[in-house]
């Protein structure tokens, strides 16, 4: 089963400001996520995951029943706690973006 990979508006803006190497890596990860949403490390929940690239991490949410993955952030280790807290606080909003019930 293939997955549709979506982005939040804030992730799209962030993506545009990244280095070309980082953009290329994220594009590669999108292709990988389209084929297999189980890649990466779970962050306390099976549906919230990260994938590391050098000193940074790509954060995404997996909606298996809907066949969708939502890219939410890309940041370094020192931002990790803040990003995780933000994602958990906005979980319902992200579900609406994807079009599923929270």
Image (tube, helix red, strand yellow):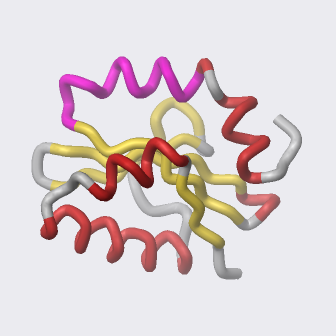
Residue pictured at 50% horizontal, 52% vertical: 71
Q: Which residues are magenta?
A: 76-88
- Chief SS of the magenta region: helix
Residue 2 as seen in the image, left or right of residue 38: right
Q: Is residue 74 above or below residue 64?
A: above
In reply to whether residue 44 is colored magenta, the answer given is: no
Residue in view at x 44 percent, y 25 percent: 84
* Horizontal relation, residue 85 to residue 28: left or right: right
On screen, residue 55 above or below 79 = below
Q: Quadrant of the C terminus?
A: top right
Percent position (x, y) of residue 45? Answer: 58, 35
Q: Residue at x 26, y 39 (%)?
A: 75
Residue situated in front as seen by the camera: 20 or 76: 20
Quadrant assignment, res 90: top right
Residue at 55% over, 76% down: 34
Query: Residue 91: x, y in percent?
Result: 67, 30
Relative to 69, residue 43 above or below: above
| Quadrant of the rendering where the N terminus is positioned | bottom right
Question: Please, which residue is most extreme toward the right here?
Answer: 101
């Amino acid at each position: 089963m293939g997955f549709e990979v979506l982005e939040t508006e804030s992730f799209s803006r962030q993506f545009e400001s990244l280095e070309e190497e980082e953009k290329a890596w994220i594009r590669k990860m999108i292709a990988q996520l389209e084929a297999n949403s189980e890649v990466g490390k779970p962050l306390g929940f099976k549906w919230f995951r990260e994938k590391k690239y050098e000193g940074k991490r790509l954060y995404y949410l997996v909606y298996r029943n809907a066949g969708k993955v939502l890219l939410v952030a890309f940041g370094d280790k020192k931002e990790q706690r803040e990003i995780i807290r933000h994602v958990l606080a906005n979980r319902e909003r992200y579900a609406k973006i994807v079009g599923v019930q929270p």
